[in-house]
Image: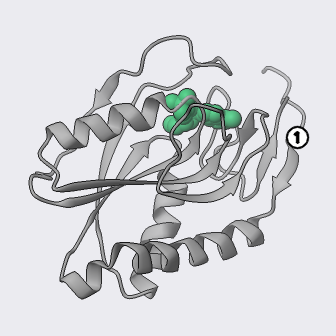
Amino acid sequence: MSPSPSEPTPIFRAEDIARRVEALAREIDGGEGWRARGVRPVLVCLLRGAFVFTADLVRALERAGAGADVDFLHLSSYGVSRVPERPVALIADLTSDIGGREVLILDDILDTGASLAFARAHCAARGAARVRTAVLLDKQRQSVPRADYCGFPCPDRFVVGYGMDLAGTWRGLAYIGAVD
Ligand code: IMP
Ligand code: MG
């Protein structure tokens, strides 16, 4: 067995993430006005990193009174690298028809913007009536368009936990930490 890598340095505590996700759900509910307009949106979770964020946000939205459907779009990841090396590719497509639907794309972290741009174009090409975006973390690179909703600005470090991994490790951490 290979030696286990040293523990990530904590950056966002589990309780702070939970509080922020709850507030983000209220922001999204207020900002989108789905209830007032009688709209049931589709949350599009970008696999694999956004699965924990999606699980928490869909429940927070439900508590805020904004029920949503959920679908998944599996995009290629960094693999074992910490930097994007190749263009984004589609690994597995949505399984529902999002034609005419209001979509909120959810990703764990916004870095170069390539994943979100790909997902946005993909949902538009599938006929979504409106495509909005929410990320838990944003590395806030210049010239990368911001998501419509963001949990926290993120330092320029490689982070893991709360669904995010480094070559498959650390996804199950309740907190978010840096491994650089
Ligand atoms: P982008 O396409 O360059 O914006 O990067 C977004 C995707 O890269 C995210 O969906 C993550 O899967 C991955 N990613 C970017 N930065 C990190 C990081 O610090 N830790 C883990 N995954 C990351
Ligand atoms: Mg990802």
Tally the numbered discs.
Answer: 1
Tell me the residue that label 1 is attached to: 7
Viewer-nearest residue: 23 or 53: 23
Quadrant of the image containing the N terminus: top right
What amino acid type is highlighted by mark number 1?
Glu
Return the residue found at the far top: 85
Q: How are the colours assigned in the image? A: one colour
Residue 151, percent from left and from top: 62, 60
Q: Quadrant of residue 20?
A: bottom right
Viewer-nearest residue: 126 or 75: 126
Residue 178, percent from left and from top: 82, 39
Residue 100, percent from left and from top: 10, 57
Q: Residue at x 64, y 32 (%)?
A: 142
Q: In this image, 175 relative to 77: left or right?
A: right
SS for callout 1: loop
On screen, residue 102 above or below 173: below
Q: In this image, 133 relative to 52: left or right?
A: left
Q: Residue at x 32, y 79 (%)?
A: 33
